[in-house]
Structure formats: structure tokens, C-alpha cells
Amino acid sequence: GAGVSQSPRYKVAKRGQDVALRCDPISGHVSLFWYQQALGQGPEFLTYFQNEAQLDKSGLPSDRFFAERPEGSVSTLKIQRTQQEDSAVYLCASSLTGGPNYGYTFGSGTRLTVV
Amino acid sequence: AQSVTQPDIHITVSEGASLELRCNYSYGATPYLFWYVQSPGQGLQLLLKYFSGDTLVQGIKGFEAEFKRSQSSFNLRKPSVHWSDAAEYFCAVGAGGTSYGKLTFGQGTILTVHP
């Protein structure tokens, strides 16, 4: 597609519910990132994929967070047993190569509200 | 570890006035530096980036930024602000070398433009 597509745009979850957030990167983009942006803050790195390989998951805040990209294109970020502190905008970004040269293309994000 | 500081949380300027948004970074090697803009409910759009070479970088929408290694700064400037520039601006630093370029963002500066 022309850009990075994320769905849903908005998600309201009850505390304890599991959620799944989807990211469709730009076709052919090798690198895919997930970032978490809390209200009033800059985005914070969660995890990185190169094709289907998850090369860095150091930013995932707890073992309730899990990300996958099984075929090297679409990625899903799953949060189990959601907590109020998980409320944030989750941004996905993709890049053609594995290096920083391009400056990534970001999606519009999924705003998660846990009530 | 790399870090970014944006000292100004909120800046207000009049339309047509000049603008400078400050960014200071901390990184042990040559940094990759970026400025992104985020409108409400939107993802991040890349304004400009610096990797090497000329320390004055031109970007989209009439923005420019100057890399000053001695001051660890990468300030964003625009000579004449338009009302459509009202948004939140994020400075980011990416690891260079063989890294895949995970980005570390500042907290952002909200720009308000008065008519």
C-alpha cells in the first residue's frame, strides 16, 4: 500500500481483556518497528523486526506484551490482561532497509484506552 | 545510552514570525538525527534528517535544522511560520553504525500559532 496502515484506530478494552493491534507496513519494507506513545510523551521503542525475525524486543514493558510478524509483512502486537497503564497510542513504522538512513514511515497509530 | 532533551514543552508564536525549536542529544558516537511533526490524531511525519556532511539540513515545508556537535544540539528553524505549522514536534536520535537505527525521541514541543 501507499502508507503504513494500522487497525483498529481506536480500541477500548476493559481491564484484564486481551487485545490485538494490527500493522500493515509498506509493501516490500524489510524493517518494522512498534513504538508506544503515552499521553504527553514522545514515542518509546517497543520492538523491531527484520523480515519475520524479531531482532530486538528490549522495549516491551512486560511479558504481557507479545509481537509477531510470521510472514515478514503484517505484524500484530498483542497485549494480554490489559492494565490501565497500557493506555497509550501504539505506533507502527516501517523502513525499506535495516538501517536508519531512510527515516521510517509511521502509521497513524492505534489509540488504546483501558477502562 | 542515547537520550534527547527538548527543553520547551510549549511554544507560541505569531503567524509570520520566525521559529526555533531546541533539541539537545546525548550519544557517544556520530548520531543520526531527525525531526518529526505530529498533527492531532496523526502519525509522525519526517521533516528532515542528518547523518553526515553539511551541518545545515533542509527539510520539507520550509524547515531547516543545524547540527552543532560542540553543543550537542540539533535545533529546528523556520523563518516565517504559517498557521498550518501548529502541531507537535519531536526530535529523535538514532544509533548509527551497524545498528538498525532504533530511535530515541524527546518529549516533544507543542507549537501554537496565533493569527
Image: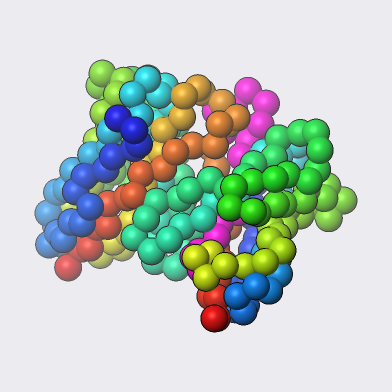
For image coordinates 64% across by 53% down, the residue present is: B62
For image coordinates 49% across by 37% down, the residue present is: A104
Q: In front: B10, or A1?
A: A1
Where residue B48 sits in the image (x, y, percent)? 62, 45
Say whether residue A83 is visible.
Answer: no
Q: In this picture, is B31 found above or below A29?
A: below
Question: In the rendered image, which quarter is residue B91 located in?
Answer: bottom right
Tell whether position A101 is magenta.
Answer: no
**Left or right position of A71 against A91:** left
How many numbered marks, from 0 up? 0
Q: Which residues are magenta?
A: B86-101
Q: In this picture, is A51 found above or below B102?
A: above
For image coordinates 43% across by 61% down, the residue present is: B39
Q: Which quarter shows the C terminus of chain A?
A: bottom left
Tell whether position B91 is magenta.
Answer: yes
Q: In front: A28, or A56?
A: A28
Say whether residue A88 is visible.
Answer: yes
Where residue A86 sits in the image (x, y, percent)? 29, 58
**Left or right position of A73 against A39:** left
Q: In front: A1, or A99?
A: A1
Q: Which quarter shows the N terminus of chain A?
A: top left
Single out the residue that lies furthest toward the right: B70
Where residue A35 sits in the image (x, y, percent)? 41, 46
Question: In the rendered image, which quarter is residue A112 located in?
Answer: bottom left
For image coordinates 22% across by 63% down, the residue present is: A113
Q: In front: A64, or B73?
A: B73
Question: In the rendered image, which quarter is residue B73 located in?
Answer: bottom right
Q: In this picture, is A76 found above or below B44?
A: above
Coloured how? rainbow
